[in-house]
Image: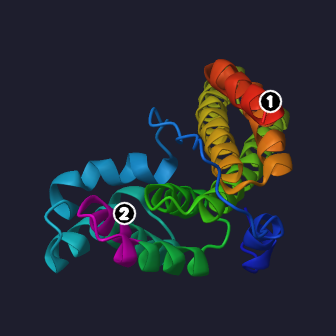
Amino acid sequence: MKRCGRRAVLMWALSWLAACAPMKRAVEPTTSLPAVDWAAKINQADSLFAKGHYTAIKDALRIYKDALEVPAWRAAVAEEYVRSAIAYRQGRLDDAEKDLRASLDIEPSGSDAAYYLGRLYADRKEWLNSGVYFAGAAFSLEEKERGMGKKIEEIEASEMTAERKARLVVKKRVQILSVQATKATCQYNGAAGFHNAGVFERALDLARLAAAHPAFADKAAELIKLIRDR
């Protein structure tokens, strides 16, 4: 995905901001969360960054650079992300928020940073912000899914051997399934955040999108009923 200005991802979500009174019955975001891409990668460095000191952070960053071969600007994203992960796990939500926002400044389309900001604001019961960032993460993941679909088309149209094509296409389709699950998680959690903030129209839109995924069909249906019966 091409880098773009911060507005390309976040202003879309921020356009839904409104001053609303919180609901008496809050819908909690789901805790059975599929791992997002960066979260899965930093698990490889858990034993390092869980220590929380500067050397451990640098060692975790080295894993990104060496094992994942990320470009220099994405390495900067990784460093901010690792710092925010440490802060989040240690309960330092203000520090985690600062680092996640710094990560988004570097990579505005970063779905993982937006996802964890949504989760952080849900922990604080700041439901409107939670809904905004979960919705932004879902938007980014939708773009990522489209990009993977185009990649499959490129692979199928290439001059690779049939065996290699089949292997690569299967790999991409598995990745798409993972992205779809994470996207549905963000859609449901975004719907919960907007519902709790009283932004019912937006909550209903996201809940309907989440309901299309089998893993969230029942939970989303309950939320849709709750919105309609208010």
**Quadrant including the C terminus:** top right
Percent position of residue 176, x then y: 66, 34
Residue 152 shows in this picture: no
- Identity, as a three-letter code, of the amino acid under mark 1: Asp
Q: Nearer the viewer, residue 118 or 35?
A: 118
**Quadrant including the N terminus:** bottom right
Q: Which of 55 and 126 is in front in this view?
A: 126
Q: Nearer the viewer, residue 151 or 204?
A: 204
Task: Quadrant for residue 164, please give it.
Answer: top right
Task: Quadrant for residue 5, please give it.
Answer: bottom right
- Identity, as a three-letter code, of the amino acid under mark 2: Tyr
Decide which of tag 1 and tag 2 comes sooner along the chain.
2
- Is 208 positioned to the left or the right of 1 in the image? right
Q: Mark 2 and mark 1 in contact (Cβ < 8 Å)?
A: no
Please give the range of residues in magenta: 84-96
- The correct choice, above or below, for 17 with respect to 158 in the image is below
Asked whether residue 64 is drawn in magenta, I would say no
At x 63%, y 24%, the residue is 219
- Secondary structure mostly seen in magenta is helix
At x 44%, y 63%, the residue is 69
Asked whether residue 95 is drawn in magenta, I would say yes
Label 1 packing within 10 angstroms: few (<14), some (14-19), many (20+): few
What distance separates the C-alpha of mark 1 from that of mark 2? 48 Å
In the image, which is nearer the foreground, mark 1 or mark 2? 1
> Label 1's element?
loop
At x 28%, y 49%, the residue is 44
- Is 161 positioned to the left or the right of 204 in the image? left
Residue that label 1 marks: 229
Percent position of residue 203, x then y: 77, 45
Percent position of residue 150, x then y: 82, 43
Q: Residue 64 carries which label?
A: 2
Label 2 packing within 10 angstroms: few (<14), some (14-19), many (20+): many
